[in-house]
Amino acid sequence: MRFAKVLALLFLISTYSFTQNNESLSVTINAVNPTSAIDDVEVKVHVKGGQKPYKYVWNDSKISIYNKDFKGWSEGTPIKVMVIDAVLDTAYAEAYVEAEGFEEKVSVIMKPAVGFLQWVLFKNVWSDTVKVDDFTLKAPFAIDQDKTDYTLKEWLKPDGAKVEHLEPIAILKDEDDEFPIYAMGNGILRHGIHKENTVKAGDDVFFINRRGSRTDKVLATIEYEEAQPFIYPNLSNRTQGIPLIVAWLVFGSIFFSIKLGFIQFNPKMIRHSIDLIRGRYDDPSQKKGEVSHFQALMTALSATIGLGNIAGVAIAISMGGPGATFWLIVAGLFGMAMKFVEATMGVKYRIHQADGEVSGGPMYYLSRGLALRGPGYRKLGKVLATMFAILAVGGSFGGGNMFQINNAFNQLQGLPGWEGLSSYGVYFGLVMAILVGIVIVGGIRSIAKVTDKVVPLMVGVYVVSALIIIGLNYNNLGYGFSLIFKGAFSPDAIYGGFIGVLIIGFQRAAFSNEAGIGSSPIAHSAAKTERPVSEGTVALLEPFLDTVVVCTMTALVIIFSGYTIDSEGLEGAALTSAAFASTLGPWALYVLSFAVLLFAFSTMISWSYYGLKAWEYLFGESKRAALIYKFLFLCFVVIGASIGLGAVLDFSDLMILGMAFPNILGLLIMSNEIKGDAKEYFSKVKSGVIKKFK
């Protein structure tokens, strides 16, 4: 049911009124931009006349009909509010806040570009309305710590009563303010049960949970006779769909899994991959390349293991329940074939400089590989390679840099007692820029020497912490995995059913391991080998370690903490941090923050290399070009830590996802070549032509 239909229902429902007022209903909006920071507009809605209570319908699905004010609106975004009174009279108001500061103006200027990229990347190839069997009602603002005298004053409808959509069912009392809570959908009202007692008049609408945190109490449930659309806080309906970018990434992974005979599930391939990493096939006379198989893998992993594992899993569970973890794992397994293909072609079409430096990645296999197929493909290859390089440079400044440093800084200033750190963003950025600069000035060899130590350390810290929690909950392992499995195939309707959970899992996996994005083959191209398929075999382990191992551990930690039942309003990295702290204690926040800092640092140094190679493809390989890029990259480290860029950062993040289109398209065209190379390589391994040296 569309939003317009929902509003039409408002004119058919029963009424409830506290006061009578003959003055006609009118609305005004007062919007204030208090600082030059982005997304801090304060909005207040003023209503005159009509009959109370009022419902406030905003043009933002996250803002509920009970909100008459809101803090955090974006500059340059229209504010639209429709107010509906008790007798269904309506009044509209609009407002617009101009950008004032530099940050705000830049963000507003970039919004059209962000909107375009979002339209392209997230355009649904399939969509449907999410329908549910019931709706859980909780008091608005119940977890607000400032609301201490907030109770259920009285029930207007008895337990078991038949109610209609938006019919008042109870009166809430917030100190001296009283207002009704409305039914959401047509159905049977069931009063809430809390600690085996029915919620009654005079009860608080919140409680303190076992973790000592404030949680909103379930006041009631509306049971539907037949499934009805899930209703957002602003009365619009929730839809689910398959974004084009997710469909494209998943298609690529599944296509190459089938094309290569599900190579990632062959135990012999896994053993061979491990042997390669251990250096058992390393030819002492091999001169081509700059880093070992292990160092190439660690450099690639340093760019993928990070916030996607910490925040991404929490987002997946929040949006799709524990079952989303199952499909996240499945997507990771299919992504292994995609990584195999990318790394193989990265090594095959790399170029070697006179000084021994190597340049490779999608820019080169798209241009050089497609050129071998004729004049038409040569032109296509140049277009795809240039498109990829432009997107990679932009992505390296944003998602591979500013996003990482910004989240690391936010994680640190969120620690207890560290709140005052917020005013030292510039200094934090300068320190991180110096550390990053020391590493990246030496190129891939220097980066690899750091990542082959930092990655094992940061993964070790994170995994050990997770394993301690899993070990303490050893008896609940069966319960944890059963939640994941059952949630995958018989999820709650609120998560969008089977299709909805599957989409969420695949989407978060695609954003986590970057299979198909084309970033990691740039690192793998520098491996010391003359056999491209050998590096592809090493690369297929990436999604397994990143998604299957680390993400599964994160999911289990969140499940064991109880946050899957009640997230307490937390999401992303904050939810994962709280899950670790709930078992290990407050000190876990510091351990996790340290891990986040390492994740951010390692991701930045790896993405600096990715961006540099794309920059050199566009502007030529020279010391001057390299220095200009590195200088810009370090400037963005400071910028990312010190100011908010809103739409600019969003645009750059979207550029990373956009890299998948030219990358996968070119690989699909060369798929037969890839299959032939793989067949030839493994036949030589089997026959002993390719031999071990250790």
Image (cartoon, grey):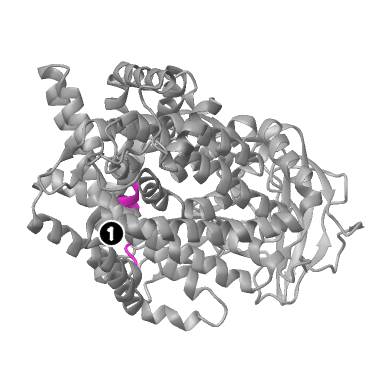
Percent across and percent down for residue 412 are 48, 73
Above or below, 610 against 489 in this view is below
Above or below, 108 against 681 in this view is below
Taking the image as shown, residue 231 lies to the left or right of residue 366, namely right
Mark yes or no: residue 72 visible.
Answer: no
Q: Residues within 10 Å of mark 1 (few under 14, many from 20)?
A: some
Mark yes or no: residue 98 visible.
Answer: yes
Q: Is residue 584 magenta?
A: no
Above or below, 689 against 113 in this view is above
Taking the image as shown, residue 187 lies to the left or right of residue 3, namely right
Name the residue that disc number 1 marks.
446
Q: Residue furthest right?
A: 196
**Residue located at (75% from left, 39% from top):** 482
Percent across and percent down for residue 613 are 20, 47
141 vs 305, nearest the viewer: 305
135 vs 646, nearest the viewer: 646
- The part of the image, by quadrant, that contains residue 601 is bottom left
Quarter of the image with the N terminus is top right
Determine the main secondary structure of the stretch shown in magenta.
helix
Which contiguous range is marked in magenta? 644-654
What type is the residue that disc 1 sits on? Ser
Element at label 1? helix
